[in-house]
Image (tube, rainbow, N blue to C red):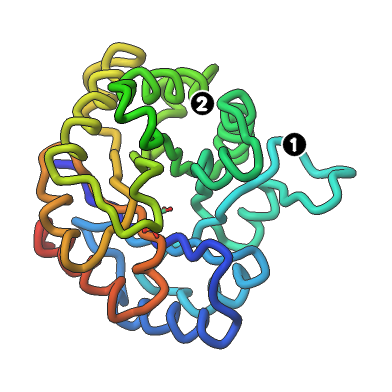
Amino acid sequence: MRRLFVAGNWKMNLVRETGLALASGLAQACPKSHPGVQVVVCPPFPYLVPVAGAIANSGVELGGQNCSAEKPGAFTGEIATAMLQDVGCQWVILGHSERRTLYGETDALVARKTATALASGLSVILCVGETLAERQANQTDAVLDRQMAGSLEGISASDLSRVVIAYEPVWAIGTGLTATAEQAESAHAHLRKWLSVRYNAGLADSTRILYGGSVKPQNAKSLMEQPNVDGALVGGACLKLDDFLPIVRAAQELRPA
Ligand code: PGA
């Protein structure tokens, strides 16, 4: 049985005081690694170091929200994967739809970032998902296939074991619209089948596929209890402990220690 995975993507939110209060509260609520549920927080870059301190020796892991595809060097404003590791990150989110649509990140760039991150020892949360227009044109599966093939170009089976996929329908991100459990399950099953064809059945079976897009305490359980939904990538609802913790607890109920 796959270990569930709940990650909070703070995006460009919170400041030191509110962020540290949230991280400390989460660390207190998750004092040690839970065998059934992995918990990750992804604060903005300036807060990685203090948040790493706040969650030290707890069951909460740290991730960055982006990274450069390049090795350290003359790249003003960029963050190298080695730097993320240096400050205690195990994870990095790549291919988020906000990066793709607002900052023009292509599948090819996402693939280069993924390769760089994996080569430096980070694990990757790789996001894919269709827009509303694409869903309405019945192109969801084709879009997912294209993004998976492009974003995982050159990634070997052994490296894929350090990749978690996040299915995030763009129309559900930050909109309050959530995919129904059936819509999520159908997309996740499609992604798992894609993994089995591109890699192999064993790897497809062991890869975690998260759902993201307006996950809330009210809908988390019904989404995560779908057979192919292995957790959640949470945006808005991860900014308050009172919202995020019930999502973590819902996962823990589904995979008791
Ligand atoms: P949301 O964001 O939960 O605010 O919809 C999810 C995400 O972008 O990962």
Q: Residue 176's spot in the image, x, y percent?
A: 31, 59
Q: Is residue 162 visible?
A: no
Residue 169 position (above or below residue 57): above
Rendered image quadrant of residue 240: bottom left
- Quadrant where the C terminus sits is bottom left
Rendered image quadrant of residue 31: bottom left
Residue 128 position (above or below residue 239): above
Mark 1 to mark 2 CA distance (whole Å): 16 Å
Q: Residue 126's spot in the image, x, y percent?
A: 45, 38
Mark 2 highlights which residue?
A: 151
Mark 1 highlights which residue?
A: 70
Which residue is at a point 44% across and 64% down the rendered structure image?
Answer: 41
Label 1: how many Cα within 10 Å (few below 14, some 14–19, many 20+)? some
Which residue is at a point 34% across and 49% down the rendered structure image?
Answer: 172
The image's mark for residue 100 is none
Instruction: Tell me which amino acid carries mark 2.
Output: Ser
